[in-house]
Amino acid sequence: MPAERRSFTRAELESFRDAEVPDLLGGPHQPVRLLFVGINPGLWTAATQTHFAHPGNRFYPALLRAGIIEHPIDPAAGMSEQDRERLRARGIGISNLVHRATAKASELTTAEQREGGARLTALVERVGPRVVAVAGITAYRLAFDRPKAVPGRQLERLGGAELWVVPNPSGLNAHESVASLATAYADAARAAGVLT
């Protein structure tokens, strides 16, 4: 039975500022094939301890449309353990460049994002995914000092993994739709062997 969708007052959300959300990674018998990387947790994500949880975020609808997941996930209520296990079983992991929660990604400093890029590289070396998909071209350019990078598959690898930059699924990224996000995510998933 799905969890009931939560709602928060502005004050409640603000209480989660600077909180962290643990990475979603596989276990010893569940290798990560595709690691999605957000910019940083939003306040709703921190409140529910669920990545990409804001009700206006299109991450999970795009994964469903792409065929990367087979069951709808409503993260705004807080992802269930069954949802997490299904993602792990598919070889999907989720992390962030910066782990502290903010109301907007624009609150992050360039230094934080660069430190996040170094931390992400270490995580990828440890976890060993086939593909890393960073969700957001501007954040990728800042974190890795690649001012001319374009979306899609990158020429360089990250910690041994194939590197993709995919569109950010935030509702603030208005020129992307669930369909266009699904196309970009499916390309990365095929490269990772999650989709055929």
Image: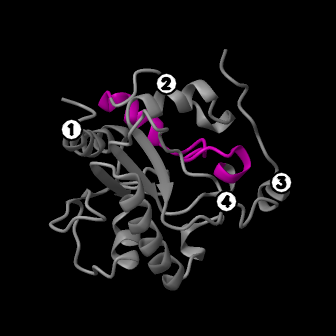
Query: What's the distance in space between the residues labelled 4 and 1, CA to CA?
Result: 30 Å
Query: What's the distance in space between the residues labelled 3 and 2, CA to CA?
Result: 27 Å
Task: Say what amino acid the circle numbered 2 marks.
Answer: Pro
According to the image, label 4 marks what residue? 20
- Percent position (x, y) of residue 187? 21, 43
- Percent position (x, y) of residue 49? 67, 46
Q: Which one is closest to the eye, mark 1 or mark 3?
A: 1
- Percent position (x, y) of residue 151? 24, 61
Magenta highlight range: 45-67
In the visual, does 69 lie left or right of 107? Answer: left
Mark 2 or mark 4, earlier in chain: 4
Q: Which mark identifies residue 139? A: none
Mark 1 or mark 3, earlier in chain: 3
Contact flag, marks 2 and 4 (Cβ < 8 Å): no
- Percent position (x, y) of residue 71? 46, 21
Question: Badge 2: few (under 14), some or many (20 or more) residues near its Cα, within 10 Å?
Answer: few
Task: Say what amino acid the circle numbered 3 marks.
Answer: Glu
Q: Which one is closest to the eye, mark 3 or mark 4?
A: 4
Element under disc 3: helix
Give the answer, above or below, for where 82 lies relative to 27: above
Query: What's the distance in space between the residues labelled 2 and 4, CA to CA?
Result: 25 Å
Question: Residue 60: within the magenta?
Answer: yes
Question: Badge 1: few (under 14), some or many (20 or more) residues near its Cα, within 10 Å?
Answer: some
Q: Which residue is pictured at 64% across the width and 29% down the height?
A: 80
Question: Badge 3: few (under 14), some or many (20 or more) residues near its Cα, within 10 Å?
Answer: few
Mark 3 or mark 4, earlier in chain: 3
Task: Say what amino acid the circle numbered 4 marks.
Answer: Glu
Q: Which mark identifies residue 190? A: 1
Question: Residue 161: within the magenta?
Answer: no
